[in-house]
Structure formats: C-alpha cells, structure tokens
Image (cartoon, rainbow, N blue to C red):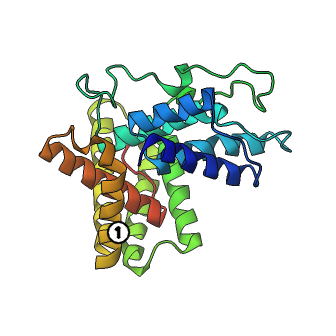
Amino acid sequence: MDTAEYCREIETYLCRKNDGHLIRVVGPSFEIVSRWAEQGVPLKIAYAGIDRYFERYYRKGARRRPVKIDFCDADVLDAFDEWRRAIGIVSDSTNPRQPDTPIPAHQSPQPQSPQSPIPNPQSPSQAPRSSLPAHLERVLLRFSSARARGTLGDAFDALIDRVSAELDAARGQASGLRGAPRHALIERLAAIDADLLRVARGSLDAGAAASFGREADAELAAFRSTMAADAYARAREAAIDRLVRERFGLPAIRFE
C-alpha cells in the first residue's frame, strides 16, 4: 500500500467515526498520516489509536464538531509503540521506519488550535504504571466479561476456572510481596499467560489459524525486509498471539 492509498483509508475511517462527516486528510494532516505510513504503522493499529481518541471525546459529553485526524496523532503513536513492544520490534538506526529514538506519543507535538474539541488530552502513556494487585483485579474482570460475552468456548472452561482461582488467591497476597516472592509470582503470571494462549491457538481451526498468519504478515510487511529471519519469526508469532488474544477477548496476564 502506497502512502496515498494509506491516507485514503485513514480518511475513510475518520469519516465513519465522524458519522459520515468528511474531513479531508490534506496539508498538515496529510503530513501526519504520511509519517505514520513511513514508520510502518499498520492500518489496524492506526484505527485503534483513532478509536482511543474518540472514546475520550465521547466521555466528554455531546460532540461539538467533527474530529480532525491531527488530534488523534498522540494516540496512534501510543498504540503503535505498544504494538511494537508487544511483538518485539525495537528501534534500529539502519531502518528509517524505526527511528533511533522514537518520540513517545505524549511528547509528540500537539495541535494547539482553539478548534480542537478536546485541547491536548492526556495521553495514556502518561498514566502511572498500575500496581500488581490492580493488574490482577483487571485480569479477573476481563475474564468475567469475556465469559459473559460468550467469546470463550468450552475448551477454555476448565483452564479459566483454574486460572481464576489461582489469580484470585494471588491478588490477596500480591500487595505484600517483595523481592524473590514477588519475582516468582510475576514469572508464574507469564507461565499462565503462555498456557492460556496455547489453549486459545489450539482451539482454532486450520482456516482461522491461516487467516491470523496472513494478518500478522500484513501487519509486519513494512518491517520484514529489515529483520533477520529468526527475529521476524519471533515477531510473527507474537503478532499472532496478539490477534488471538484480541479474537477471544483474553486479558494479558503477564505483568510487565
């Protein structure tokens, strides 16, 4: 996909988010979106960043005017940074798509126009890191929500019961853990997370598994030529894990 086509896709998505009101991606807006394309931001990740901005916008009450793409820049860069960390893509001075020192979204230039519907909203990356007990609480809530929505099949039932009981017990002691016991719990959470993903991937039929593989390849297309084969293989597996987690509504149990 060339830059012009990428910008048209973003423009179309923004139009839908603005309830059909067309806001052209031209001038400075085109430069912003072109930069996303040059950095290799997958369209799906850009859409997720745009969604974040609109979610905050709606929480502010009734909308006053259509949103310009400029206001979504920080959230798109945040989503892109999270996606790269999740699949293990790091900065590389030899790759123009991955600058040496990528600017976190909360430090990127913000539009100062008085027309902004939400002036300089706080970026999610500015939020303080959550505590381990709070993390466990959110994981348990996500499990309950996924079960209520029916996104988890019968293959998950026994595992979810076991994991939920283990996490609930861990939540009660997590706030008092220090040193080696805390490290052991964090390692256990990573192991549980890997078990959950293994069950999830094992429940996919051949068609779904192939579809996730193709989607992962599409997301990584901008980076493939600059990555060693083993690094690409690891990133691809991580991208598939992320897509599977998204498909089933699974929480990330590992604590970063």
Nearest the eye: 235 or 35: 35
Nearest the eye: 31 or 165: 31
Q: Is residue 107 above or below residue 149?
A: above
Q: Which residue is mark 1?
A: 211
Q: Looking at the image, which residue is at 45% across and 65% down?
A: 247
Q: Is residue 191 left or right of residue 1?
A: left
**Residue 51 pos. (x, y %):** 62, 47
Q: Is residue 159 above or below residue 256?
A: below
Secondary structure under the numbered disc 1 in the rendered image: helix
Q: Amino acid at mark 1?
A: Ser
**Residue 202 pos. (x, y %):** 28, 72
**Residue 35 pos. (x, y %):** 47, 31
Nearest the eye: 70 or 242: 70
Query: Can the viewer see residue 89?
Result: yes
Asked which quadrant contains residue 28, the reply is top right
Q: Is residue 224 above or below residue 109?
A: below
Q: Is residue 232 left or right of residue 110?
A: left
Nearest the eye: 110 or 153: 110
Q: Looking at the image, which residue is at 83% across and 43% down?
A: 63
Q: Is residue 94 above or below residue 131?
A: above
**Number of marks in the rendered image:** 1
Query: Can the viewer see residue 130?
Result: no
- Other-residue count near label 1 (Cα within 10 Å), few / some / many at <14 / 14–19 / ≥20: few
Q: Looking at the image, which residue is at 35% across and 31% down?
A: 178
Q: Which quarter of the image is occupied by the C terminus? A: top left
Asked which quadrant contains residue 110, the reply is top right
Asked which quadrant contains residue 161, the reply is bottom left
